[in-house]
Amino acid sequence: MSKLRIGIIGAGGIAAKLHLPEMQTVDGAEVVLISGRRESRLQTLCDKFDVSAWTQDFEAVIADDSIDGVIIAVPHPLHVEWGLKALAAGKHVHMQKPLSTSMSEADEFVQAAEQTDRTVLALPFYSKPSTLAARQMVQDGVLGKISAARARHSHGGPEVYYAGIQQIFAEETEDDLWFFDADKADVGALFDMGVYAIANLVTILGSVTAVTARLTTANKPTRLEDTAALLLDFECGALGTAETGWCDPARTSEFSIHGTLGKVAVHGRDQPLIHYRPSSLVDEDADLISETVEVSAFPDENSHQHWIRCIQAGAQPELCNARSARHITEIMLAGLESSKEGKTIAIQSRI
């Protein structure tokens, strides 16, 4: 079987730090064309990741009939525009997060994705062993009735992230911190980092029915929020808390799911899934039993490996698809509205 030919639209930090490194781990596919604005960055990426061609014309990737799939890695205001063009050209699509900051755009993308046989994977990618194992334990009733959940995903902010990107490209540019520009970025830490915390909980517990949120700017030089906390009403009856921010240089990536028979938790990036349960349901002082959950039964793959595997199987991702990305987009937009209006916002979409 010949390798799938992949093109990338966008040659910025996320292509350098995520898409190209992960594509090098994929069997059965190769990146053959990168498009972007800066010639120096394009050449650097081609040299570093052994890509044969680059172009400064995004349309050239769409128009190339030899390309099977397209990775959308442009700034988020352009995600849906180029995702729709790729689908219309018959390409499989790997969509960077967030899908959009507009429900009309998100609806349009879902409609286009579901009217094609092309495989669409939409980040964030949470088909990870620990998350899948927690999801299975919830579905199997191991934790009892789920009452609450919490997830947090945060880091030190765009300026910290881009310091590493500038090292990759060996250059400093004046517009990499567009994340802080309210006119360009439109949204802040919630859509940048909170999307991960929300996706984690939605993957495990399912659809959200309502959102109550508070957003603030605690430290960064921007009119956008740099800190956010969302209270999520889940269709299953549980309450969830999704936290995020740009003011956490120690970095946090964790979640916990709480039920009437026990709880599971991941206490940090690359940490194991721990199952906690009481040794007695009638003695509050009884010892707590904790054990590491075996997760080897679940596939340990990155988003690009999963995308290519789905393409080869003629399938859609079960979890990280256009419909789930739209649901997460609606949750985040509801968070913005809730914080502004001081009220709970109902969610219409479901996954």
Image (tube, rainbow, N blue to C red):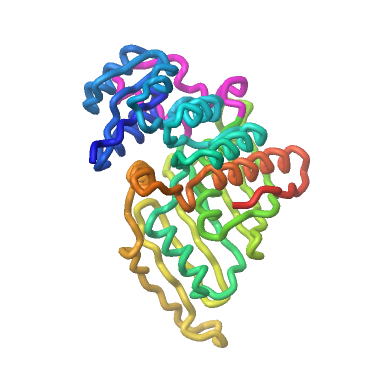
Against 214, residue 100 (above or below) is above
Q: Which image quarter: residue 8?
A: top left
Task: From the image, give the main secondary structure of the stretch colored magenta.
Answer: helix
Against 210, residue 263 (above or below) is below
Against 161, residue 299 (above or below) is below
- Magenta stretch holds residue 164: yes
- Quarter of the picture containing the N terminus is top left
How many marks overall?
0
Residue 47 at x, y percent in the picture: 22, 21
Against 170, residue 287 (above or below) is below
Residue 342 at x, y percent in the picture: 77, 43
Residue under the image location 52 percent in, 49 percent down: 199
Q: Which residues are magenta?
A: 157-186
Residue under the image location 37 percent in, 68 percent down: 293
- Magenta stretch holds residue 230: no
Residue 120 at x, y percent in the picture: 46, 40
Determine if residue 185 is in view.
Answer: yes
Left or right of 137 in this view: 164: left
| Camera-nearest residue between 120 and 214 | 120
Determine if residue 164 is in view.
Answer: no
Residue under the image location 58 percent in, 21 percent down: 184
| Camera-nearest residue between 112 and 170 | 112
Left or right of 111 in this view: 49: left
Q: Which image quarter: residue 159?
A: top left
Residue 149 at x, y percent in the picture: 56, 61
Left or right of 39 in this view: 152: right
